[in-house]
Amino acid sequence: MNLDLENDLFNNLKEKQFMQNFIKELSNYLEKNLTHNTEISGVDNTWNNLLADNLEIGNQKIISKYKDEMLLERTNILQNYALKTKDKGEMYYIYDIDTNGKNTYNLCICEPSKSHKVITKKIEDLPEDARLGSVLRKQGEEIVLEKEDTRVIENQINSMIKEKIKKQDQYLDSKRIEGHIYEADEKYLGRIWLYDLNNKVDGGIEGIEEIEFPKNLYETAKKGDKFIYQNGEYKKYE
């Protein structure tokens, strides 16, 4: 992959706050549904155990490739379900806490032609028990909470998340090649960009966003340092 393209991707990783917000929301899903299955009520409790700038789901780091796929697939899930159940009324989804205040939610309209619109609502103006990940419907002049639709959407998104993490693991395993030499580039949030010097693609060098790099090497690694993948781990290449 072209080095300039890889650097652009890395910069986007650092700059796109809305994507980081989505990863936080996914953390909430796994924390609530895949670990202990207890209901989280209230905005403060929802966010208590989340680290503000970590691109993680629970303890699982997510690389930009699969983060972007999760964003796209979430949109597809919402739009497909909204289309399938359009007779129940216009569908809304609570996807984020507004940056201007913890007592305000951001909602999206799940129809494809309106998905770019952001609706901001104070918590007290929404149905009781509405939270991140809730599905709402417009019925007449009223917005109501659809608990069954919320359950269906949560299950679909959770299944998607687990499948993407599995594919990410397979993808990264395929890029860690015995005997190959890798050159370090940027470091960010416990991840490091490596370029496989033994694997050229279309005239460029393939880049890897590595999230399982030895801590002792990560702390001292500098741009241009070289490492070899040997016996299942990265080692400094002299």
Image (cartoon, grey):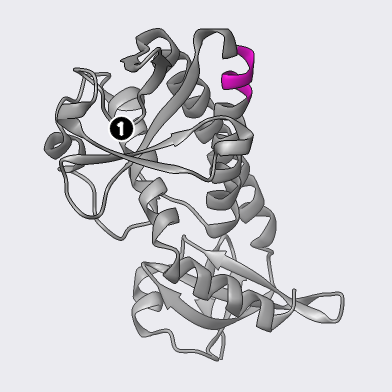
Q: Position of residue 75 (x, y in %)?
A: 57, 37
Residue at figure coordinates x 37%, y 67% from the top left:
190
* Quadrant of the frame with the C terminus: bottom right
Residue 17 shown left or right of residue 130 in the figure: right
- The segment highlighted magenta reads 80-84
Residue at figure coordinates x 59%, y 79% from the top left:
7
Near-viewer residue (192 or 133): 133
Label 1: state its secondary structure: loop
Q: Position of residue 86 (x, y in %)?
A: 58, 14
Residue at figure coordinates x 54%, y 35% from the top left:
74
- Magenta stretch: dominant secondary structure: helix
Residue at figure coordinates x 50%, y 89% from the top left:
223
Q: Position of residue 48 (x, y in %)?
A: 15, 43
- In this picture, is 57 found above or below 89? below
- In this picture, is 190 found above or below 26? below
Near-viewer residue (167 or 126): 126
Circle count: 1
Residue tagged by mark 1?
A: 132
Quarter of the rendering containing residue 71: top right
| 178 is within the stretch colored magenta | no
Q: Position of residue 180 (x, y in %)?
A: 69, 73
Residue 68 shown left or right of residue 44 in the figure: right
Disc 1: CA contacts within 10 A as few (<14), some (14-19) or many (>=20): many
Residue 170 shown left or right of residue 26 in the figure: right
Q: Mark 1 belongs to which amino acid? A: Leu
